[in-house]
């Protein structure tokens, strides 16, 4: 038996040893698709069906391409592995265009521009347009419409007449501008090789001779442009193309991926050989049974049922906890993580918290920071890295003492007309030789620093705000809701108005007023919860000490560095694809979050997204949902996601009170711990 087939299961071996003709490998979650790709490449070379340079593998990430080459090299040797053409679609397109640049009239060393550069080119083109409202156009939207016209010859997305007219007017001018600049954009890296191959049979035939076998990884993520290219790359005589993917994990529709490509592949190639990899080596049987029950409700999918092969873990039935609100949800998740870490059942890096929307991570972050548990946010911005939170923390720091960096940060936030030039004058004057004057004293002596009197008046107004900050802290603690009092403070100093007037965008849409305020509201709520915790421990603690301990959250080590560090992972369902963790928490399995009220138009894709989240868990899967959740600053009733409707009690344990019943040994253990603590207190008296 070939060394490449020796350790494979029967289905994997069948896929890896397939040689001629089209092949569809339906690789379920955790079924070893990369192993099959590597084994097939090695098998074709070992059995002399192809030389290494006659194999081409198209992937969606450079990491996947490098891994394939590395694993082939471990058995074949680095020299042969290097000859395999493993690359992303865009990298392949770039190499192809460099080689055949004359076929589309470009110099060999043309440049490549990204989307931001393309939008800049469109803005420049618009300067020659006599249109009364040209400055109001969102040129990112125009760019997407232009790409529709380039790919399909027609628009695929709904838009207004003005935008449609603008896209048609700009398209030829945009293409001409790219040519004039001697550059291509990312769309060109796929479109132009397709056009060159269509228009140059000699180049196409040469390519057919050079590359005998094509393989495509993550085929469910292909878009129409990539499919057009593949149709030109594959020799219609031998049809030697093998694609690997899982239609149940097609979750990138918002990027243009079309699940129909993997669904229709056997129809496109009549003699297509289909191999199903249904053995899951990642998760426990209980997790896989739950996932199967969720995904079976999807329409238009290749029939397959995953079977768990991993019996090395305890087969714990997945759990769903119903909590009062998102604050209780965050407290629950923190408690669960603390128990896992305390009992040495898991390291931080073996735990992942997944959610549909980035905003769901904010409250969890505050809980993890407060407990000094290291974490990393992937696929979104950490709450503590947001400008408005750093601004807010800057004000709070100054309430408990002088802090020069914070003072410099907020002196002109919100805008007061104190510009960089004036601040530089003050800083330079303060740092003159033989002067021991800090930035604050420099502000107070602005006239000596040569600052314009008009700016000086603005500085005087700011200093009034600064000098009153300690009293503001006392006012926050006076009466009523701490969160509301803190929010009112930011309103009083003009920061709320500043946020609402700022031009902030998210997902190409201008943020609603309430959405702009959400991070700041979470910050205020977080501080209020911290105050309650501290006062429960000692009601006589002064506000300044409570605030200082809260600000320690911001002094923790940065959470954005090395992947190898031991940290709890926070990420969206989308960002989790391809990853696995021993313990997984899925937050907010509720209607309007999953499927998402705004982004979840394709219910089948939203269910696939849920399925991806479920199948990230290896040992233990915990889901949470709330009875009520804040929407636009108000608590609203919420219900469980429809995706749980087909799940029976055999596959999911639901705790309506948000509490897991104690086992007898747990009660005994807690009683023992309590008595030990009591004994310590008695001895210290």
Image (cartoon, rainbow, N blue to C red):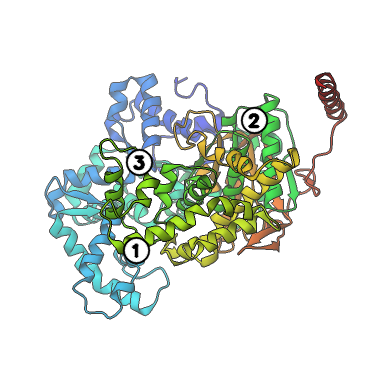
Q: SS for tag 3?
A: loop
Image-based side of 579 in relation to 112, left or right: right
Which residue in the protein does label 3 denote? 437
Q: Which mark is residue 140?
A: 1
Q: Which mark is residue 309?
A: 2
Q: Marks 1 and 3: which is nearer the front?
A: 3
Spatial separation of the CA atoms under disc 1 and disc 2:
47 Å
Q: Marks 1 and 2: which is nearer the front?
A: 1
Image position, residue 650 (x, y; %): 79, 43
Image-based side of 603 in relation to 666, left or right: left
Q: Is the residue 457 above or below the residue 420 in the image?
A: below
Q: Which mark is residue 411?
A: none
Q: Residue at x 36, y 51 (%)?
A: 443
Q: Reading the chain from its start, which is encountered first: label 1 or label 2?
A: 1
Q: SS for tag 2?
A: loop
Spatial separation of the CA atoms under disc 2 and disc 3:
70 Å
Spatial separation of the CA atoms under disc 1 and disc 3:
48 Å
Q: Residue at x 54, y 54 (%)?
A: 519
Q: Reading the chain from its start, which is encountered first: label 2 or label 3?
A: 2
Are discs 1 and 3 less than 8 Å apart at CB? no
């Amino acid at each position: 038996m070939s060394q490449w087939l020796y350790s494979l299961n029967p289905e994997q071996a069948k896929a890896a040893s397939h040689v001629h003709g089209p092949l569809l490998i339906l690789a379920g979650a955790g079924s070893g698709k990369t192993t099959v790709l590597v084994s097939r490449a090695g098998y074709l070379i070992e059995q002399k069906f192809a030389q290494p340079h006659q194999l081409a593998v198209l992937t969606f990430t450079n990491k996947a391409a490098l891994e394939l080459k590395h694993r082939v090299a471990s058995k074949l040797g680095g020299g042969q592995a290097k000859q395999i053409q493993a690359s992303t679609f865009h990298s392949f397109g770039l190499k192809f265009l460099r080689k055949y640049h004359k076929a589309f009239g470009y110099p060999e060393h043309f440049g490549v521009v990204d989307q931001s550069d393309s939008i800049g080119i469109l803005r420049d083109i618009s300067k020659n347009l006599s249109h009364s409202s040209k400055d109001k156009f969102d040129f990112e939207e125009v760019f997407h419409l232009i790409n529709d016209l380039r790919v399909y010859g027609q628009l695929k997305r709904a838009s207004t007449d003005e935008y449609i007219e603008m896209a048609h007017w700009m398209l030829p001018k945009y293409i001409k501008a790219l040519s004039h600049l001697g550059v291509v954009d990312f769309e060109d890296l796929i479109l132009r090789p397709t056009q060159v191959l269509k228009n140059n049979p000699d180049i196409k035939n040469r390519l057919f001779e050079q590359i005998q076998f094509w393989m495509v990884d993550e085929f469910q993520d292909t878009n129409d442009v990539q499919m057009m290219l593949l149709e030109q790359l594959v020799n219609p005589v031998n049809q030697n193309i093998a694609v690997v993917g899982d239609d149940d994990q097609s979750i990138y529709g918002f990027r243009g991926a079309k699940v129909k490509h993997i669904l229709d592949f056997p129809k496109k190639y009549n003699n297509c050989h289909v191999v199903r990899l249904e053995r899951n080596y990642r998760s426990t049987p209980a997790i896989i049974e739950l996932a199967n029950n969720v995904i079976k409700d999807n329409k238009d999918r290749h029939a397959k049922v995953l079977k768990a092969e991993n019996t090395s873990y305890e087969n714990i039935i997945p759990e769903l906890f119903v909590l009062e609100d998102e604050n209780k949800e965050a407290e629950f998740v923190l408690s669960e993580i603390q128990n896992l870490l305390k009992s040495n059942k898991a390291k931080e890096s073996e735990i992942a918290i997944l959610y549909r929307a980035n905003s769901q991570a904010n409250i969890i972050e505050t809980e993890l920071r407060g407990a000094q548990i290291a974490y990393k946010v992937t696929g979104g911005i950490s709450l503590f890295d947001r400008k408005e939170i750093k601004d807010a923390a800057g004000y709070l720091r100054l309430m408990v003492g002088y802090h020069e960096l914070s003072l410099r940060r907020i002196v002109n936030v919100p805008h007061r007309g104190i510009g960089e030039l004036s601040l530089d004058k003050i800083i330079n004057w303060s740092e003159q030789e033989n002067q021991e004057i800090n930035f604050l004293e420099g502000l107070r002596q602005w006239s000596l620093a040569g600052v314009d009197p008009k700016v000086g008046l603005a500085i005087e107004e700011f200093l009034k705000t600064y000098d009153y900050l300690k009293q503001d802290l006392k006012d926050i603690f006076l009466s009523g809701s701490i969160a509301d009092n803190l929010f009112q403070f930011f309103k009083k100093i003009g920061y709320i108005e500043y946020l609402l007037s700022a031009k902030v965008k998210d997902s190409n849409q201008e943020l609603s007023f309430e959405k702009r305020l959400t991070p700041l509201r979470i910050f205020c709520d977080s501080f209020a919860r911290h105050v309650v915790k501290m006062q429960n421990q000692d009601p006589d603690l002064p506000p300044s000490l409570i605030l200082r301990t809260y600000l320690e959250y911001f002094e923790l080590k940065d959470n954005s560095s090395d992947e190898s560090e031991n940290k709890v992972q926070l990420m969206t369902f989308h960002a989790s694809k391809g990853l696995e963790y021993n313990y997984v928490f899925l937050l907010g399995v509720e209607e309007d979050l999953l499927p998402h009220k705004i982004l979840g138009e394709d219910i089948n894709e939203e269910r696939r997204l849920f399925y991806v989240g479920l199948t990230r868990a290896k040992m233990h899967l915990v889901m949470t949902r709330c009875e009520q959740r804040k929407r636009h600053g108000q608590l609203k009733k919420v219900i469980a996601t429809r995706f749980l409707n087909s799940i029976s009690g055999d596959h999911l344990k639901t705790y309506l009170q948000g509490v897991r019943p104690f086992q007898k040994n747990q009660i005994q253990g807690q009683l023992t711990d309590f008595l030990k603590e009591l004994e310590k207190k008695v001895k210290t008296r």
